[in-house]
Image: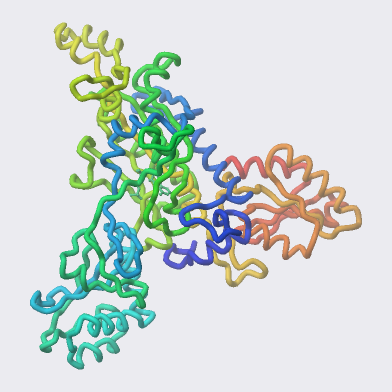
Amino acid sequence: MTAPEDKNMDELVALCKRRGFVYPASEIYGGLRGFWDYGPLGTALKNNIRDWWWRCMVDCPPIGPDGEPVAIVGLDSAIIQNPRVWEHSGHVGGFNDPMVDDKETKKRYRADHIYVFYPKNFKTEHKRFGIAVQASSREEAHKLRDELWESGKWSKVVFRAQKEFGFDPLEGAGVGAQYGDKVSDFLNVYGPNGEDIGDWDVITAEELDEEHRKYTTNLELTNFGTLTKPQMFNLMLDTYPGPIRDEDAKAYLRPETAQGIFLNFKNVLDTMRVKVPFGIAQIGKSFRNEVTPRNFIFRSREFEQMEMEFFCPPEDSQKWYDFWRDVRYKWWLSLGVAEENLILRDHDDDELAHYSSACVDVEYKYPFTAPGYGELEGVAHRGNYDLTAHSKSKEKNRDSNAKLDYFDQELQVKLQNEGVDKAEIKERSRYVPHVIEPASGLTRAVLVVLCEAFTPTPDREGSKYILSFKPKFAPIKAGVFPLVNKDGMPEVAQKLYLQLRDKWPVEYDGKQSIGKRYARMDEIGTPFCFTIDGDTLEKQLVTVRDRDTAEQETIHIDQVEAFLAQKLAE
Ligand code: ATP
């Protein structure tokens, strides 16, 4: 298996384009930043992951901690809702990211995604300088710094910064850049008076002080940027339904699917045979005006989410949080992601929203974060924050007309049997349910599956890469080929193709050399190819070629369907 560090994102992006997985949106007009189109194979891959999530969450959810099957129902709510929803959910006031602008280049960045390296002991009376890189995590920032060093550019930036900031480095500063071959060998930068300024430190642009902001040069090397103070920027995209375009008509494209679920809590409760604990799940598009969409489809402005809100009694919420934390981690493994590339990261207390008592991220080692990890799902204990936020309340000026609480009859009976006193039973059996929310990105899951499957095969004849999807998720499950396009082989191959096509997406291909046809199937991640050759005509034997090993075996033509069914069930 190729390590994430050894996978090249540019090559993966090019392969996705060349083989019809993901195209830049409106490409013929020069594209639009943060938007992507999913091609025929990307759509199939995305649908397979989507269907698997739905199967595991709605059609056949796991057995719960008490040994009972968990109840979850599905939903598909509107993308545009009454704008009051977003005021009460906190998105209008709080869905903000701190941003910094580069005054010279006029580019805008998320302040927590700009990491500035600066010489730690550089004295304050001297002008200070920092070198900024744009990264999603500290690990990625260090990786970029190391790459800059290896490319020889780091020393150039340092020289440049020193010159720009008007101090006259002693020879040591310059010469130091040529010593050694790691960044750590270039720690001895000297100040204007020859003093050793020692180690480099790193801070985010959110923490930059005035002095550093002025003297920060950015990654593009040529652009000398002065960063502004961080300013808040709302991430919701707005729109104006109806004929009048004024502030009163302003509505928002949803930035998450979750709120549509809270809005329908009562509808589902009143119309479906569910009782707490139960969940409502939804998959759909979300929109965020991300300031720096980047890393291919990792962070886009239009994306798809898979979210489930699990409503439970407050007294049991910790139990359910632990349950979903575990179930969701295992689900990512079921996509074929290797355990060593997947971690659970508990949020520190200072990362938690004020209403949340716990949150854990499932993180993946993407090629662009390795050796670090990046988020793909958050499992949050949201308390009763959301249902309370959408419940009618005169004092709090909440103008919904709903009371989103729940009377728990089973709990009432249980407490009565336990002999709990009446007042306490009344108090405990009517409550606003607590919510455990596993929230993940479908389009981010597509990226994870693509990154995991992407395997350079420089030594293989024909294909330079394979996409080693778990067969269940492969867009095309099998290729059916006549070895040559004559001698009765196409007819037999067509017959087999029509038989398999009834069950799965399979492809028939009779053109080009067999090597080229295998290579194409490797690159689109088709796990098996069935070739009809002379042996088929004589002995009914079909050659099966395995994508990952390129090994071939023969099986009887009558066994092909059962063979494929078994592999796809794994
Ligand atoms: P981040 O910190 O990366 O901005 P977040 O913590 O704001 O993400 P959530 O609001 O918890 O993300 O959204 C749940 C999931 O939705 C994320 O784990 C991710 O998989 C997906 N997601 C969020 N924003 C984007 C985006 N801009 N593009 C693609 N997927 C996204």
Identify which residue, 285 or 501, lies in the foreground. Answer: 285
Q: Residue furthest right?
A: 487
Q: Quadrant of residue 109?
A: bottom left
Whether 516 is drawn above or below 382: the answer is below
Query: What percent of the width, then of the height, locates residue 300?
Result: 44, 51
Identify which residue, 386 or 220, lies in the foreground. Answer: 220
Identify which residue, 303 or 488, lies in the foreground. Answer: 303
Query: What percent of the width, then of the height, locates residue 136?
Result: 33, 58
The structure residue drawn at horizontal position 38% and vertical position 57%, both measured from the top left corner, is 292
Q: Is residue 98 toward the left or the right of residue 483 in the image?
A: left
Q: Residue furthest left?
A: 125
Whether 25 is drawn above or below 513: the answer is above
Examine the rendering and report whether any part of residue 285 can be seen: yes
Q: Quadrant of residue 238?
A: top left
The structure residue drawn at horizontal position 16% and vertical position 66%, both measured from the top left corner, is 210
Identify which residue, 319 or 129, lies in the foreground. Answer: 129
Query: What percent of the width, then of the height, locates residue 86?
Result: 33, 34
The structure residue drawn at horizontal position 72% and vertical position 64%, both measured from the top left corner, is 516
Examine the rendering and report whether any part of residue 538 can be seen: no
Figure quadrant of the C terminus = top right
Q: Give the image's coloring scheme.
A: rainbow
